[in-house]
């Protein structure tokens, strides 16, 4: 019969994971989508052999699929945990296992790491998980699932209600596969632990993962170690840690419109990632750019408890940028910073944060590869007296603070500074040595004169200067050579200053560009109902809640440009709270808006031409404008007069003179 026919395994549906009973009860086959009509499949589902145990079902499936049964699975049937790691199941073995587990009610943990399941085997298991709601922990690591498997798993997560822990490490997920998980976890709040380590997520992957954590309110632990979330991906991902939405149970009071100024209404607002406590970002190459973005995110995120940044190419500069965020954070307890390019200077930065931040919750800092010095140990002992629970793991004592080597000062510059302080000329200095007035002195006399003077030069500096002045070894120092050496020194000094200014300018532009990218990423992952408020804005005191208004960042420009007099925000109880009219700020003096702080220096916009009356009204209404006119730097911003004013007046005068001459001639 059909048992002798070839069995197709390339198409699969939930119905195909059932063994059906036919005319001969010993002939059991595996049906696929293309073999029967939908009505026939439904009718065959009613004929499932209920008298077959899980063991018999698995043996029959292995016989049909053509694989060897796994004895370990048969021995551990009925146990809560089944560990089938490294058993070489392959796609067909996964299909037989999926058939047996469709109706299993005992297994809660299924470990299938390193079985070369491929996307096909993952598809069989995901079809099984659409019917099995007993399995809670699933490990599919190192199975070469790739993009097709990512799509199947993401679609399964939209329907499954039992999976709480999912491990997909080393699945060879590509850049855009993160979008599948972003879409799945936008509605799945049951998965608490997710492992996506050892994959290939880069820039776009960081954007999708940032969107994932911004929209999810169920994940408690996320492992993204051993990916490629470098500058762009790191900044985009960190933006998801900063987003605030209407889901944190924090009451924010909003002022009503002008006619209800005395009444207030409160609506619940909660932060995205209220459950994300453990985050592993190690081995991602964040660098100082990622540390800057993460520091900005930690200023707002108040849920992370454990943060792993081991081996991320972060230097002392990046550590200081990260610590700026730790100064405003009061929830992070464990910080892993091992195997970064840190010195004693970076280690001191971390413990100084604990010392200078009373509300800090940091209990453990891991910098186990850093050699510290005695000053660090002494300071740590003093800090531990105030914070007895603090533990700092360092490499040992014997390190030093990384300092740049001392630059060798040009001896000619020392002489020039000496002369400038005493308001002397170089010729005056040389004339005191040149007694004959020949503008040439022996090297011995020049050396002796410099040593006897009060010029702060050491012996090696004097010899270096003499070698430059007497390159031909003639034993004579010429004044012209001394003057040329001074000119070269001044040119080199100006060139060095330009290099320093250029480097500082580039560093500032780079940091501004990173912050701008971070802010645009925050706006991209911010839902429309989200709230952007400054850290510590909503604080309770003994008198109650502080009244203030919160404005959605993504809708701020719509409020300004809108002609409507009210703007409504939906709260969790689907009630509407009306904000006051924003057209005339002076009409509601009690209204204040707390939006996201501006991370960039304010750039003045060019003012458009206005009538004198309008400018006067504007200066009276805006005190900042009038004060700017009285500032001492106001004269520096005066514009030059038009270049064509004088020539035009001269031409007019000349024209009048010519007309007078013509009249005289007439």
Image (cartoon, helix red, strand yellow):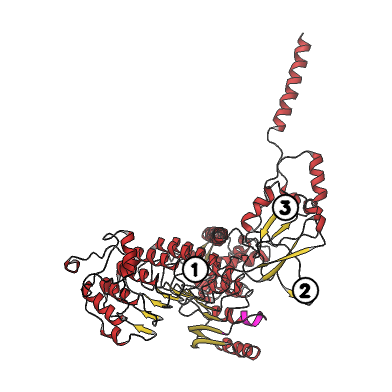
- Residue 201 visible to the viewer: no
| Front one among 347 and 137 | 137
Whole-percent x, y for residue 112 in the image: 34, 78
| Front one among 424 and 137 | 137
C-alpha separation, residue under disc 2 versus residue under disc 1: 36 Å
| Front one among 661 and 162 | 162
Sequence-first disc among 2 and 3 = 2
Mark number for residue 27? none
Q: Is residue 359 magenta?
A: yes
At a point 19% along the width and 65% down the height, the residue shown is 6
Rate crowding at label 2 as few (under 14), some (14 to 19) or many (20 or more) other CA atoms within 10 Å: few
Q: Is 176 rendered above or below residue 352?
A: above
Element assignment for label 3: loop
Mark number for residue 566? 3
Rate crowding at label 1 as few (under 14), some (14 to 19) or many (20 or more) other CA atoms within 10 Å: many
Please provide the residue range marked out in magenta.
Answer: 352-363
Mark number for residue 188? 1
Element assignment for label 1: loop
Q: Do the residues labelled 2 and 1 touch (CB within 8 Å)?
A: no
Mark number for residue 544? 2
Q: Is residue 385 magenta?
A: no
State how many labels appear.
3
- Residue 494 appears in which quarter of the rendering? bottom right
Q: Is 276 rendered above or below residue 151?
A: below
At a point 36% along the width and 63% down the height, the residue shown is 147
Q: Nearer the viewer, mark 2 or mark 1?
A: 1
Whole-percent x, y for residue 546 in the image: 76, 69
Q: Is 584 rendered above or below residue 283?
A: above
C-alpha separation, residue under disc 1 versus residue under disc 3: 34 Å
Sequence-first disc among 1 and 3 = 1
- Residue 245 appears in which quarter of the rendering? bottom right
Element assignment for label 2: strand
């Amino acid at each position: 019969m059909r048992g002798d026919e070839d069995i197709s395994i390339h198409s699969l549906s939930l119905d195909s994971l059932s063994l059906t009973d036919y005319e001969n009860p010993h002939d059991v086959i595996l049906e696929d989508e293309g073999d029967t009509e939908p009505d026939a499949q439904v009718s065959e589902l009613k004929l499932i052999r209920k008298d077959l145990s899980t063991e018999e079902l698995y043996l029959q499936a292995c016989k049909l699929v053509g694989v060897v049964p796994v004895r370990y699975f048969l021995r551990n049937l009925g146990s809560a945990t089944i560990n089938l790691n490294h058993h070489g199941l392959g796609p067909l073995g996964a299909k037989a296992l999926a058939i047996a587990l469709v109706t299993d009610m005992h297994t809660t943990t299924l470990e299938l790491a390193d079985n070369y399941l491929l996307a096909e085997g993952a598809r069989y298991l995901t079809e099984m998980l659409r019917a099995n709601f007993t399995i809670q922990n699933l490990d599919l690591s190192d199975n070469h699932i790739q993009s097709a498997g990512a799509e199947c798993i993401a679609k399964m997560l939209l329907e499954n209600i039992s999976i709480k822990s999912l491990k997909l490490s080393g699945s060879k997920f590509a850049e855009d596969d993160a979008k599948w998980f972003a879409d799945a976890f936008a509605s799945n709040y049951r998965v608490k632990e997710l492992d996506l380590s050892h994959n290939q997520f880069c820039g776009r992957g960081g954007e999708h993962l940032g969107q994932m954590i911004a929209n999810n309110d169920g994940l408690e632990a996320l492992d993204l170690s051993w990916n490629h979330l470098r500058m762009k991906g790191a900044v985009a991902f960190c933006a998801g840690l900063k987003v605030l939405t209407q889901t944190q149970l924090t009451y924010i009071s909003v002022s009503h419109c002008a006619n209800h100024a005395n009444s207030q209404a409160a609506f619940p607002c909660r932060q995205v990632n209220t459950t994300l406590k453990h985050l592993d970002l190690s081995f991602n190459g964040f660098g100082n750019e990622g540390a800057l973005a993460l520091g900005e995110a930690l200023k707002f995120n108040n849920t992370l408890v454990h943060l792993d940044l081991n081996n991320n190419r972060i230097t002392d500069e990046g550590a200081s940028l990260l610590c700026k965020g730790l100064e405003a954070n009061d929830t992070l307890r464990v910080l892993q910073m091992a195997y970064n390019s840190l010195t004693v200077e970076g280690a001191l930065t971390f413990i100084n944060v604990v010392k200078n931040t009373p509300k800090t919750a940091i209990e453990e800092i891991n910098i186990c590869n850093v050699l510290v010095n005695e000053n660090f140990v002494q300071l740590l002992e003093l800090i531990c007296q105030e914070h007895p629970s603090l533990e700092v793991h360092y490499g040992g004592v014997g390190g030093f603070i990384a300092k740049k080597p001392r630059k060798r000062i040009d001896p000619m510059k020392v002489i020039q500074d000496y002369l400038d302080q005493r308001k002397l000329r170089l010729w005056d200095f040389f004339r005191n040595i040149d007694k004959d007035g020949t503008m040439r002195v022996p090297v011995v006399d020049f050396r002796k004169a410099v040593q006897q003077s009060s010029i702060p030069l050491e012996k090696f500096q004097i010899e270096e200067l003499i070698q430059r002045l007497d390159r031909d070894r003639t034993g004579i120092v010429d004044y012209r050579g001394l003057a040329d050496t001074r000119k070269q020194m001044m040119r080199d000094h100006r060139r060095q200053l330009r290099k320093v200014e250029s480097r500082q300018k580039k560093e500032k532009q780079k940091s501004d560009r990173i912050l701008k990218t971070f802010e645009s990423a925050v706006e991209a992952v911010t839902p429309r109902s989200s709230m952007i408020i400054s850290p510590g804005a909503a604080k309770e005191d003994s008198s109650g809640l502080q009244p203030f208004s919160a404005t959605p960042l993504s809708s701020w420009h719509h409020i300004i440009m809108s002609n409507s007099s009210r703007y409504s925000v939906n709260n969790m109880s689907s009630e509407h709270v009306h904000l006051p009219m924003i057209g005339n700020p002076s009409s509601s003096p009690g209204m204040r808006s707390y939006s996201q702080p501006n991370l960039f220096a304010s750039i003045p916009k060019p003012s458009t031409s206005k009538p004198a009356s309008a400018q006067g009204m504007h200066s009276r209404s805006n005190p900042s404008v009038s004060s700017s006119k009285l500032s001492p730097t106001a004269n520096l911003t005066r514009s030059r007069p038009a270049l064509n004013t004088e020539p035009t007046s001269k031409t007019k005068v000349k024209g009048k003179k010519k007309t007078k001459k013509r009249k005289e001639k007439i």
